[in-house]
Image (tube, rainbow, N blue to C red):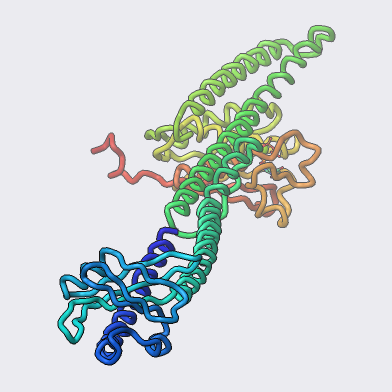
Amino acid sequence: MLVGATTFTVTRWSLLDQLDRELVEVAQTATSSVAADYADMGGLSAGLLAASNGLLAVVGADGTVEQLPGQDRDLPPGNEEIKVARLQVGSSARTIEGNGVTYRAVAVPMRLNDGTPVAVMFARPMSGLESTLGSLWVVLLIAGGLGVLTATLAALWTARAVLAPVRRLSQAVKSVTQTDELNPIRIYGRDDLGELTQLFNTMLRSLAQSREQQRQLIADAGHELRTPLTSMRTNVELLLADDSTGMLPPGARTEVLGDVAAQLGEFSALVGDLVALTRDDHLQRPHELVDLADVTVAAIERAKRRGPGIEFDAKLEPTPIMGDPSTLERAITNLLDNAVKFSPQDGTIRIHLSEGSLVIIDEGPGIDEADLPNVFDRFYRSDKARNTPGTGLGLAIVAHTAEVHGGSVKADNEPGAGARFTLRLPVLEPLDDPFLI
Ligand code: ATP
Ligand code: MG
């Protein structure tokens, strides 16, 4: 609007200036005819009117005025014209209103033949200029309006475009809090908002990861707690049955009670471990120097309590490694528990430990070739195992423990026997042994 008003003012000013110059030129040209008229007739003749196409008058220095005869309107002289007549320098220009018509009038100095100073005043209607300015005003008004409209629309569009990613981001945050789903947000552009979205996605990812870890920990904890609990219940049921029937041979009762006590100890140690594990930021315990043979012996003791009729044939070499004894013991127990679970009643489980490889072979049905690649997956159980107790987490925990200790675990079948599991862990070289340096 300001631009429109300025354009209008400047155009008006320059058009007026042009008109004035034009009028002054006509007035100056008229001076010679005026001089001739005065010389010939002592006054103005009507002939000038047609030639000048406007109003003409001669103004004296005393304010007297002589109009051109035949004009439809008088030209009343003002101070400006009288000044021009008196001083005989420059020119004047002003706008005259009257009878509903606006005139632009100029005055230029001249001297009559007898030397009398006068001013020739010449005026033309401003209708042409006014109509030009009127149209200009309309054009500027329309252009200005359109400009304002376009600018408003552009501003609205830009605001929408700029705010769209912000809206998407806040929508995503809202959906995370409302639905509890940690889905990543689509990233648009590489600007600050894109970066913010990326950071937000990273946060969502690590939240999802820690939620998954928590879920896994709870599932693993359930698994680890259930196993000793089950055998404890079996033993207690056995004692109860013996109370009413007296079926146990002498001394067996004490043995079963000893087992229950050991299992209770195992159970509370496990609860302690799990609580410590939940508090641990990295969900991982510090490693220390341990002999894998000792750990295996402890695991065999545990497994024996779950498979009373089964023979354990162990050949264990001392194997110094860096690790967490309780996690390792639980992993080996899981392997032995499986061996016990799938062994025939009076089967033998062979356990060999040498050069960092712990091999456990049972006399059960073995594992189908088709199942071999999947047995370490969480919750995977072969069709054959459906009627045995379990959740399918045991081997997943073993695989995770092996990985955390920089080792590996493998499943296959022993020709002429059952399943064979091989747990490999990096053995400390004598020089690595911190106690030997
Ligand atoms: P749990 O969670 O109680 O350990 P599970 O023993 O069935 O249940 P995993 O220990 O993970 O689960 O074993 C997964 C599957 O691998 C078993 O269901 C079984 O099909 C197979 N498997 C594991 N060990 C043996 C084995 N010694 N002999 C035959 N099959 C085995
Ligand atoms: Mg198992």
Callout count: 0
Residue at screen point 25% across, 76% down: 119
Residue 259 shows in the view: yes
In the image, 408: left or right of 85?
right
Tell which residue pokes out farthest to the front in this image.
42
Residue 318 in percent (x, y) is at: 42, 38
Front-most of residues 20 and 359: 20
Could you say which is closer to the camera, residue 313 or residue 33?
A: 33
- Kindly give the residue lying farthest to the top in the view shown: 243
Q: Quadrant of ligand 2?
A: top right
Residue ranking furthest to the right: 245
Position of the C terminus by quadrant: top left
Residue 61 image position (x, y, % from top left): 21, 70
Specify the quadrant of the image occupied by residue 341: top right
Where is residue 52? Give x, y as percent: 38, 86
Measured along the vertical axis of the image, is residue 249 above or below residue 393?
above
**182 or 144, which lies in front?**
144
Residue at point 30% right, 82% down? 27
Work out whether residue 208 or residue 58 is closer to the camera in this orientation and state it. 58
Left or right position of 427 against 231: left
- Quadrant of the drawing holding the N terminus: bottom left
Q: Does any portion of residue 339 appear in the rendered image?
A: no
Q: Quadrant of residue 255?
A: top right
